[in-house]
Image (cartoon, helix red, strand yellow):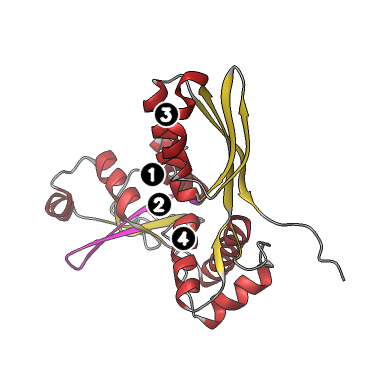
């Protein structure tokens, strides 16, 4: 009776895996991972690479179980250390997803970007937030290209510029701050602060000089640095509202 055929050692079929693929000069390298752990690793939440990988073996094709030759690894990564190579592929490779997963991911990203804009922006004329549906419709009309490998916050900032260029009356909602300054420095610093705020709601001259102000979010860091430097760390800037919006119902 003939001996049973042995599967070549270079073939290790794996199933139910998430594949991260990296290409170098027409050569393909793949690693088998746990999908959620790949995302956690890239966000810096997961630190243990053994929790991310199903195996440290580097493949030419995970689904067929074909391993990458050592000479190809050396040429592409300048090392044959599989752990180090896996780290490079995790960082620079592309996570392979099914068409349905990609569609669902794009839809979730689309809604997340629209929601960020509604939370952070207002109608320039009414100072009220836009309905999410308004932003979503604008994104569709402008054929705004969603990128899965770029953060939603970064894409929301880019979209704000695009919406402005297309004449939507949109602007960043103002931030509301409370600023505490030692009394003896109040008069000295006030002119500089006035040049950075949109409106001063309230001033109190007591044991400390206190201001409640509205600012463009882009000036927040400048104000913090100004107060800290001028007061030598004795002043304080407190955020009262990250995005001031007019939420009152219109009178009919």
**Mark 3 and mark 1: Cα distance apart in space:** 64 Å
**Mark 2 and mark 3: Cα distance apart in space:** 62 Å
Instruction: Judge whether residue 209 is colored magenta.
Output: no
**Mark 1 and mark 4: Cα distance apart in space:** 39 Å
* Quarter occupied by the N terminus: bottom left
Residue at x-position 47% and y-position 34%: 190
Q: Earlier in the sequence, mark 3 or mark 1?
A: 1
Q: Quick check: 133 left or right of 199?
A: right
**Mark 2 and mark 1: Cα distance apart in space:** 6 Å
Residue at the top extreme, as displayed: 207
Residue at x-position 17% and y-position 49%: 77
Residue at x-position 48% and y-position 75%: 144
- Magenta stretch in the rendered image: 21-35
Q: Secondary structure at mark 3?
A: helix
Which residue is nearer to you in this view: 158 or 196? 196
Q: Earlier in the sequence, mark 4 or mark 2?
A: 2
Question: Neighbour class for label 3 at 10 Å: few (<14), some, many (≥20)?
Answer: few
Query: Which circle marks residue 32 in the picture?
Result: 2
Observer-side mark, 4 or 2, equals 4
Residue at x-position 18% and y-position 43%: 80
Observer-side mark, 3 or 1, equals 3
Q: Earlier in the sequence, mark 3 or mark 4?
A: 4
How would you classify the magenta stretch by its main secondary structure? Answer: strand
Per the image, the residue denoted by label 1 is: 55
Q: Position of residue 99 (x, y in %)?
A: 51, 72
Which residue is nearer to you in this view: 231 or 29? 231
């Amino acid at each position: 009776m003939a001996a049973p055929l042995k599967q070549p050692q270079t073939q290790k079929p794996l199933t139910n895996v998430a594949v991260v693929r990296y290409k170098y000069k027409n050569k393909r390298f793949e690693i088998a991972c746990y999908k959620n752990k790949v995302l956690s690793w890239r966000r810096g939440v997961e630190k243990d690479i053994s929790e991310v990988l199903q195996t440290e073996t580097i493949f030419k094709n995970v689904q067929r179980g074909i391993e990458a030759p050592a000479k190809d690894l050396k040429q592409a990564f300048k090392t044959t250390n599989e752990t180090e190579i896996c780290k490079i592929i995790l960082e620079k490779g592309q996570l392979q997803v099914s068409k349905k997963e990609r569609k669902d991911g794009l839809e979730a990203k689309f809604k997340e970007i629209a929601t960020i804009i509604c939370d952070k922006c207002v109608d320039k004329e009414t100072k009220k937030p836009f309905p999410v549906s308004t932003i979503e419709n604008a994104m569709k009309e402008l054929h705004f290209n969603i990128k899965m490998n770029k953060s939603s916050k970064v894409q929301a900032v880019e979209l704000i510029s695009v919406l402005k260029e297309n004449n939507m009356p949109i602007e960043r909602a103002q931030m509301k701050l409370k600023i505490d300054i030692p009394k003896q420095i109040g008069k000295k610093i006030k002119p500089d602060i006035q040049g950075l705020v949109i409106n001063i709601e309230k001033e109190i001259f007591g044991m400390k000089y206190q201001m409640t102000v509205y600012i463009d979010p882009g000036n927040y860091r400048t104000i913090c640095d100004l107060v800290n430097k001028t007061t030598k760390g004795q002043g304080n800037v407190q955020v009262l509202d990250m995005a001031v919006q007019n939420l009152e119902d219109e009178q009919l």
